[in-house]
Image (tube, rainbow, N blue to C red):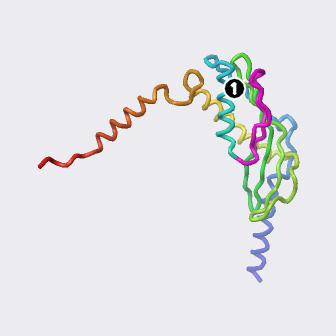
């Protein structure tokens, strides 16, 4: 009987913990969006556009994440970005719009309209997407948005002149590689 009570209590705690992320205190509406402006004085708008597109494709590798609109002339990229967050016996697919505007060597990155759907472990979705409203869930989303923002900034700052992400001279890489390899190769003694 004691084990049954403990097991029941454990199930209640797991379910409560799983639902807890999406319930609770409602977040201020202003927190449901995030905007970050980056200044890149050594990059042209064309370079920034190419780098932002490349970063988007590399960073957001979920099937549900995609670029929905691109306009190089006006420096605009809009897409959907989805990530998963687990909690208890549930996990959540959190989807939001990501918007990038490029103008005057600046990049404006915005995250907006976050929604979620709950997925039970081992099962499919329990409902269609709903607005992300609770403070706890917005905190999770904003943490993810901050990681994405930092990733974009690092990606662009590490790009070489001309927007190229590859080494300036591939011979440099090859020659250091062959030098390292030649040091590690031992030749048998001559007879």
Q: Considering depth in this image, is 56 or 26 the residue closer to the camera? A: 56
Image-quadrant location for residue 160:
top right
Q: Is residue 74 magenta?
A: yes
Q: Is residue 54 magenta?
A: no
Single out the residue that lies furthest toward the left: 191
Judging by the rendered image, the residue that carries numbered circle 1 is 49
Q: Considering depth in this image, is 107 or 4 the residue closer to the camera? A: 107
173 sits to left or right of 8: left
Residue 5: in sight, yes or no? yes
Q: Considering depth in this image, is 142 or 93 the residue closer to the camera? A: 93
- Residue found 19% across the figure and 49% down from its top: 188
What kind of element bears circle 1?
A: helix
Q: How many discs appear?
A: 1
Image-quadrant location for residue 162:
top right
Q: Position of residue 5 (x, y in %)?
A: 78, 77
Q: Position of residue 157 (x, y in %)?
A: 59, 26
Q: Determine whether 121 is above or below 117 in the image.
A: below
Q: Position of residue 53 (x, y in %)?
A: 69, 32
Q: Determine whether 91 is above or below 79 in the image.
A: below
Single out the residue that lies furthest toward the front: 191
96 sits to left or right of 163: right
Q: Determine whether 132 is above or below 33 in the image.
A: below
Q: Position of residue 41 (x, y in %)?
A: 64, 17
Q: Determine whether 139 is above or below 102 in the image.
A: below
Helix, strand or loop for the magenta stretch, by majority: strand
**Label 1 crowd bin: few (<14), some (14–19), many (20+), radius 10 Å:** many
The residue segment tinted magenta is 62-81
């Amino acid at each position: 009987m004691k084990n049954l009570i403990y097991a029941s209590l454990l199930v209640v705690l797991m379910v409560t913990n799983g639902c807890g992320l999406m319930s609770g205190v409602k977040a201020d509406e202003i927190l449901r969006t995030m905007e970050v402006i980056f200044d890149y004085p050594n990059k042209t708008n064309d370079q920034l556009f190419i780098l932002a597109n490349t970063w988007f494709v590399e960073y957001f590798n979920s099937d549900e994440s995609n670029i929905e609109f691109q306009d190089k002339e006006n420096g605009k990229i809009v897409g959907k970005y989805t990530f998963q967050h687990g909690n208890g016996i549930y996990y959540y697919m959190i989807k939001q719009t990501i918007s990038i505007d490029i103008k005057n060597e600046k990049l404006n990155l915005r995250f907006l309209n976050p929604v979620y759907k709950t997925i039970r472990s081992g099962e499919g979705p329990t409902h269609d997407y709903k607005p992300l409203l609770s403070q706890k869930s917005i905190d999770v989303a904003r943490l993810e948005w901050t990681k994405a923002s930092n990733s974009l900034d690092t990606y662009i700052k590490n790009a070489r002149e001309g927007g190229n992400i590859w080494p300036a001279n591939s011979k440099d890489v090859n020659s250091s590689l062959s030098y390292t390899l030649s040091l590690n190769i031992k030749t048998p003694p001559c007879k």
